[in-house]
Image (spheres, rainbow, N blue to C red):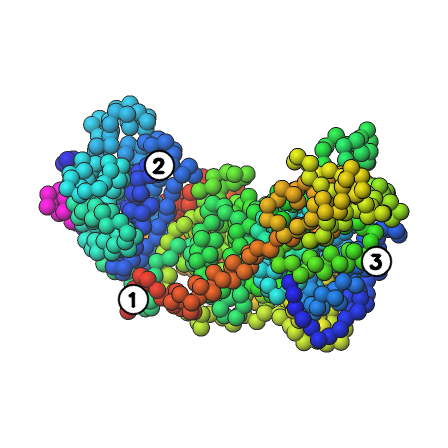
Amino acid sequence: MISDKIKLQPEAIEAVVIRFVGDSGDGMQLTGTQFSDTSAMFGNDIATFPNYPSEIRAPQGSLYGVSGFQVHIGSVEISTPGDNLDLLVAMNPAGLKTNLYAVKPGHTIIVDSNAFSKKNLEKAQYETNPLEDGSLENYRVIQVDMTSLTKEALKKVEGLDNKSIIRSKNMFALGMVYWMYGRSKEHTIEFFNKKFKNKPSLIESNTKVLNAGYYFAETLELIPNAYTISPAKMNAGTYRIIMGNTATAWGFLAAAEKTGMELFLGSYPITPATDILHELVKHKHFGVKAFQAEDEIAGIASAIGASFAGDLAITTTSGPGLALKGEALGLAMIMELPLVIVNVQRGGPSTGLPTKTEQSDLLQAMYGRNGESPVIVIAASTPADCFYYAYEASRLALEHMTPVILLTDGYIANGSAPWKITSVDELPEIKNKLTTEVVENWHPYNRDENTLARDWAVPGTPGLEHRLGGLEKDSLTGNVSQNPENHEKMTKIRAEKINRVQNNIPDIKTEFAESGDLLVIGWGGTYGSLHSAVKKINEEGYTNIGFAHFNYINPLPKNTEEIFKKFKKIIVCELNNGQFAKILRINFDGFEFLQKNKIQGLPFGNNELIEEFKKLVD
Amino acid sequence: MEATTEQKYTFKDFASDQEVRWCPGCDDYVILRSMQKALPEMGVKREDVVFISGIGCSSRFPYYMNTYGMHTIHGRAPGIASGVKLANPNLSVWVMTGDGDAMAIGGNHFIHVLRRNIDLNIVLFNNEIYGLTKGQFSPTSLVGQKTKSSPYGNTQPPFAPGELALGAGARFFGRIGGNVPKDISKILIESNKFKGTSLIEVLQNCVIFNDGCFNNITNKATKEDKQIYLEHGKPMVFGKNRNKGLVLNNIKLEVVTIGENGVTQEDLLVHNAKEKDLTMHQMLVRLEYPVATGIIRSVEEVTLEEREEELTRQVKADSKFKKTDDLFFSGETYTVK
């Protein structure tokens, strides 16, 4: 069953990358999540990356119906889900075919050999069976009759139909991998007990299959338990595994609690942002008002209404939804109301690649509105720091009386990572602009002279009744004004207000090198890939390469130009055709911004980056 | 919504300092004044009143009211008003809209707001034309109507706002002429009292682009013969001499004359605005002669915000999560030393 050509030596390794692939109905997401959760409990640092088709259940066995879940676990700091695989678990030929490219030569592939039927091979467009034709001889292939072994394990369990039996074969695979990496099954068994509380037969069957896989790997000693991965060195504290979208939702919960405000979400379901809605609707116990509207526009419209009435108001969406919200966003901008718009970016344009990641909404976030319409734009960089940037988006919206667009992306939104739990008490203060004081000649557009943020009086406050609107308003009274000079003045005030946010955000820092030959620049969700690539290359001796990652896009940090001056070359890496590079060119004269772009719906891989960086300094 | 206040307001308290800029002779002035006069009667505090509008002539309304208000974007007022009301259910929230704003660009929001039943008051200024963009046909313009965008006559059949609203689930629907300030005030007060989304269609004359469009219905000299003003619990009688009425003949409403063919007042239908079954209300909103005005439907049901509040109360009572820390540290966590 194991090809003898590759002999595996026991090795102590720091990190492994494992990918589970199968049909979109094979339960690969669940298998991967269970494995990563268990590893995190064990104390490993992890990063995960689910990759699934946009069809809910694409035709069985087809190449485009392959669903995958990748886990990177290690005893060192892990910042990306990894690119080259140490282990591929393929539940069918299509999964093998579409993922083989990523397996490191000499490394392990576990396949369900029962699934390599003539029919499935045809669907995966294999002319010959790769398990027999020698094409896999550079890999360590472990063929397991998983389907029949699963059936065998469940022979005596009553009340199961054939479909449920076959469906639980993913747990056989999981059991095997648990044994290989010395992981305990307990976490997953507990999970079954909770999930199938009302279906005891499913608890029994899944546990049996998990055990069967585990003991299969153990008893037959088919697989040397060669790997030992010890817990990672992480900062002391209490951690949990969190998905980016959950972290985003929780950041808003924290901001609401900190300010004592009620949280209002107006939203319309859209991939890959919907999980934020799913999460927030659960939290009625914190008084969260989550409103599923009839469309994207009503989603933001209701949030604008709630903001006017004094709630911490947010709306969540992805690229196409942001396009629909554009006009309303302009309204919130001219009315100068606090509002957070979360855009979980996906592949575009149009419907594009709904389940794949991309950073191509940056220019839409910056400029996608009629008229001069500046707003704050910030971006989260990891699944865990979605929490912090959702909080930060709320803080900036409330302190500066403006819409804030928070960009995340499908990669970090669906990925998970350890999050050092942050209590609300540890978070920075938020000073909102709410006022109830009746003063003579009060106008809604009275501004703070430093920040230019206006006062916020909400309905229910006697004596401060006022009207806002989308028409241009007089700079003093806020009444409708068509005066030409006033319009120019107001346009400039609104721009300056956003510029001054620079005084309320941190400086950009460089990592690995303060000055040198090459500065690697990224923004948003590519942090993990870029950080680990620069780290690796640095360890190889390239200490002349620095890294600066931007979370604040509009406005940019004050010291941005300073750090650019310290490097001979600058390369801007992003998952689009060069949008951030364009923004930098507009803002900073006299620099050449080289570009590294990837527009494949996938995150950067370590090796492609390292290769590029080396070329620039060698 | 209902609230009480010790302060006594007059209509002047609700007028803002802004110069009103509608065309001279527009019915919008009548509606504005009727609102300013009705508000002191409603017993709501001025600071608790919010006017939300979209785009169009009617949507200038909030600027003229000395209350809280927002003049927003085309068609989206129902969404924005929903957010205001859900954020603070103590407010009296009004949506001021027109036929284009509500039923063309905002059609989706219009039907959904009626379906949800949030306690909002929607006043629909129907003038069967686009006024602010200077005279194109609207979704209520008649077939054949000549407008700037239909010089040879409109070919698009119209919506009947009442039918659309009832079909979408409106619990309160009233219709009134744009030239009868006292009746408008009265219906506005009833709309505010009604718990749930209420919709009032005002047959509003546009003096510039569609002058006289409702003349055969609202003309003061003949309106009593052309309209039937419905009141809950009262017989469906109309006419200058109060001698005409409505009966049901097979499945159609029929106009009869009291004293003719042995018809007496007792034979007439009695208006029941609180009847849940839509059949009669649908027939009434469709009636072309006489045109039904007054409150046609008023059926209270639990509102969305009441449902939400009740759910929130229950979830809060049952939940172990009181603060975000309870959530953040719940479930599977692990400690690194």
Q: Which mark is residue A29?
A: none
* Image coords of residue A418 (percent x, y): 35, 59
A334 or B156: nearer the viewer:
B156
Q: Which residues are magenta?
A: A215-226
What residue is shown at x 47% (from left), y 41% (from top)?
Answer: A354
Q: Position of residue A404 (x, y in %)?
A: 57, 58
Identify the residue position indicated by label 2 in the image.
A66
The answer to whether residue A371 is left or right of residue A287 is right
Q: Which residue is mark 3?
A: B20
Question: In the visual, does A232 lie left or right of A375?
Answer: left
Q: Residues within 10 Å of mark 3 (few under 14, many from 20)?
A: some
Q: Residue under label 1, please give it.
A: B336
Amino acid type at mark 1: Val
Same chain? Circles 1 and 2: no
Q: Nearer the viewer, residue B230 or A434?
A: B230
Residue in the image at 87% along x and 48% along y: B220
Is residue B77 visible in the rendered image? The answer is no
Cβ atoms under marks 2 and 3 closer than 8 Å: no
Determine whether label 1 and label 3 are within 8 Å by CB: no
Q: Nearer the viewer, residue A273 or B116?
A: B116
